[in-house]
Image (cartoon, grey):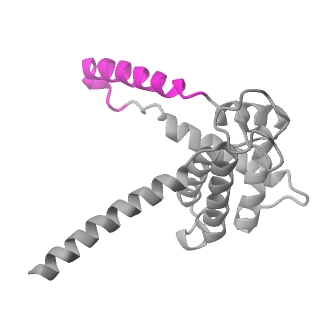
Amino acid sequence: EFRHHHHKYHQIMSAPHHDYSRRKDSNSIEGSSSSSRPNQQQAPQPLSRYESQKRRDWNTFGQYLKNQTPPVSLSQCNCNHVLDFLRYLDQFGKTKVHLHGCVFFGQPDPPAPCTCPLKQAWGSLDALIGRLRAAYEEHGGSPETNPFGNGAIRVYLREVKECQAKARGIPYKKKKKKRNGQLKAINDEANKGSRKR
């Protein structure tokens, strides 16, 4: 049953982008039907896609903790359990991350298949942590002790992002440098102008 649950989770985590366009359609349908029936406002609203996903993520994480040996309660959970959970999810990933020895390392569109591992994409993990961080506090957890907001999680996600950027040839860093360079140029111009005055 747990495997089945995680298979479903795997499908959710790797859902294609066109699902989001489907969400827009359903929202527009709900909007038109609700406007024609103003008297039914008291009926409970269906959960948004984000809220549904957040609930599934929270349940999956709780199940993961229960399956540890020995089981871990949510009150005992710390950032190490969260890091282990993120690594565990890699087995359900669909993003090819080339290893250093692979001939396709650093190529965004490799021309042929290879044996490098599939992992969870950085963006998926980052969004997941955001949802779990919110869910933790909604379930009574303190922001000060929130394991999902721990600095170690941010460091891990940054490392995953940089590693995947290099392995897949995605220029995350180049964009940042360019932006910072533009800001520096603007600041330099502003400083020159103030000096002239």
Q: Position of residue 94 (x, y in %)?
A: 72, 35
Predominant secondary structure in magenta? helix
The residue that appears at 86% across and 55% down in the rendered structure is 68
98 relative position to 27: left or right: right
Q: Position of residue 177 (x, y in %)?
A: 46, 60
In the depicted structure, whether residue 121 falls above or below residue 196: above
In the depicted structure, whether residue 194 falls above or below residue 72: below
Q: Quick one: 186 or 76, which is closer to the camera?
A: 186
> Which residue is the extreme one toward the left?
197
Can I make out residue 144 in this image? yes
Does residue 38 belong to the magenta stretch? Answer: yes
Q: Position of residue 169 (x, y in %)?
A: 63, 44
129 relative position to 174: left or right: right
Q: Quadrant of residue 80?
A: bottom right
Look at the image and tell me in which quarter the N terminus lies: top right
Q: Quadrant of residue 153?
A: bottom right
The span picked out in magenta is 16-42
The residue that appears at 20% across and 71% down in the rendered structure is 190
